[in-house]
């Protein structure tokens, strides 16, 4: 399934469908990433981004706070301090990088953060997209994106980030996500953000149980009715570990590829991954089968 839509990011417009779903590479500027691939060294983070661009990443998603709920919240000032050197150096990195088999070149830059104080401080430094895992409880982050011309990713969840929601139960998770997207798109638009600047994320593993996550993977195409790009977060997720019986997230890449291919068949426009090389190669191989 290939859905025609357009995303207006800060530096350019992106038309979907492309040759394949876009690949978003994950760069963690922290020391407590669940996948164990974070670094507090700005140069190290830039080197990871450079490698991902060479492997074919279409977007780089940089964050400075782990979403893990069993880790302390990073202070606002510390999160800004971690992000600033990367954001300042990223334009120079892109100019000198040797892009791989990407769909978008140069890649878009996504900033993974949810607190409005951080967004207000770092968006003037750059960024095409804000990847907000807060579920947009109010319109502040949408207003900030509108002010700077950035796009906004709205992820389905409940409650605040960094708080465990393992007891959450859904009568029908697909109906709940459907109603959530309807409400949050309206909220973002009322804050001044154009609909063309919105990306939707069903929030795999966030306030969801195993069967909830599997239902999303089976029926992702249901959410195309909103006419917005769908980001499918597939990489090394807990649900993959549950299905395969693998505790170590770094050993879940085979399951990640399987979920990614399923998402591509159902029209996911963006996939978010740790292993960019495996994702790009897999999607290039499967592209003739899902077009």
Image (spheres, grey):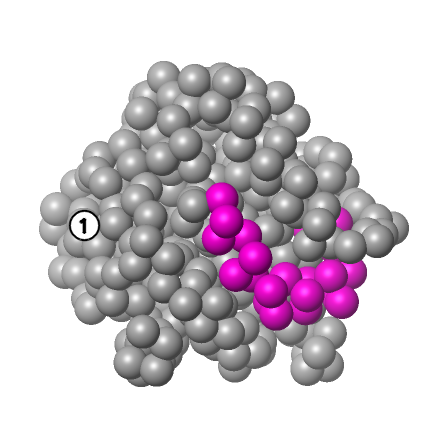
Is residue 232 one of those drawn in magenta? no
Q: Which residues are magenta?
A: 206-226
Task: From the viewer's perspective, tell me whether residue 258 is left or right of residue 204.
Answer: left
Task: Check disc 1 and report its element: helix, strand or loop.
Answer: loop
The residue carrying mark 1 is: 106
Quadrant that contains the C terminus? bottom left
Residue 208 x, y percent position in the rendering: 75, 55
Residue 132 x, y percent position in the rendering: 53, 37
Residue 101 x, y percent position in the rendering: 20, 68
Name the residue at 22% across, 54% down: 104
Task: From the viewer's perspective, tell me whether residue 76 is left or right of residue 290.
Answer: right
Quadrant that contains the N terminus? bottom left
Residue 121 x, y percent position in the rendering: 42, 20
Name the residue at 65% across, 26% down: 137
Viewer-closest of 55 and 58: 58
Name the residue at 37% across, 76% down: 290
Viewer-closest of 19 and 167: 19
Magenta segment, prevailing SS (helix, strand or loop):
helix
Against 161, residue 20 (above or below) is below
Task: From the viewer's perspective, tell me whether residue 270 is left or right of residue 160.
Answer: left
Against 263, residue 64 (above or below) is above
Q: Is residue 265 visible?
A: yes
Against 253, residue 9 (above or below) is above
Viewer-closest of 51 and 171: 171
Against 83, residue 100 (above or below) is below
Viewer-closest of 105 and 251: 105
Name the residue at 14% across, 60% down: 98
């Amino acid at each position: 399934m290939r859905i025609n839509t357009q995303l207006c990011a800060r530096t350019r417009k992106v038309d979907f469908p492309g040759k394949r779903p876009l690949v978003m590479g994950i760069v963690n500027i922290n020391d407590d990433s669940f996948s164990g691939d974070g670094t507090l060294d700005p140069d190290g983070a830039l080197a990871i981004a450079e490698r991902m661009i060479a492997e074919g990443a279409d977007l780089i998603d940089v964050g400075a706070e782990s979403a893990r709920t069993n880790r302390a919240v990073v202070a606002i000032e510390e999160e800004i301090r971690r992000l600033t050197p990367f954001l300042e150096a990223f334009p120079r990195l892109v100019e000198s990088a040797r892009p791989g088999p990407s769909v978008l070149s140069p890649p878009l830059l996504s900033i993974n953060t949810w607190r409005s104080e951080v967004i207000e401080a770092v968006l003037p430094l750059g960024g095409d997209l804000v990847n907000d895992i807060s579920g947009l409880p109010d319109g502040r982050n949408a207003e900030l994106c509108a002010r700077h011309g950035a796009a906004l990713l709205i992820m389905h969840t409940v409650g605040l980030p960094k708080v465990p929601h393992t007891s959450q139960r859904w009568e029908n998770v697909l109906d709940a996500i459907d109603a959530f997207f309807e409400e949050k798109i309206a909220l973002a638009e009322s804050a001044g953000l154009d609909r063309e600047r919105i990306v939707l994320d069903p929030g795999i593993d966030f306030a969801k149980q195993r069967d909830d996550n599997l239902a999303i993977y089976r029926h992702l195409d249901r959410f195309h009715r909103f006419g917005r790009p769908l980001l499918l977060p597939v990489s090394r997720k807990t649900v993959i570990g549950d299905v395969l019986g693998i505790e170590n997230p770094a050993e879940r890449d085979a399951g990640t590829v399987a979920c990614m291919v399923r998402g591509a068949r159902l029209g996911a426009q963006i996939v978010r991954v740790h292993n960019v090389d495996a994702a790009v190669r897999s999607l290039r191989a499967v592209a003739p089968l899902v077009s």
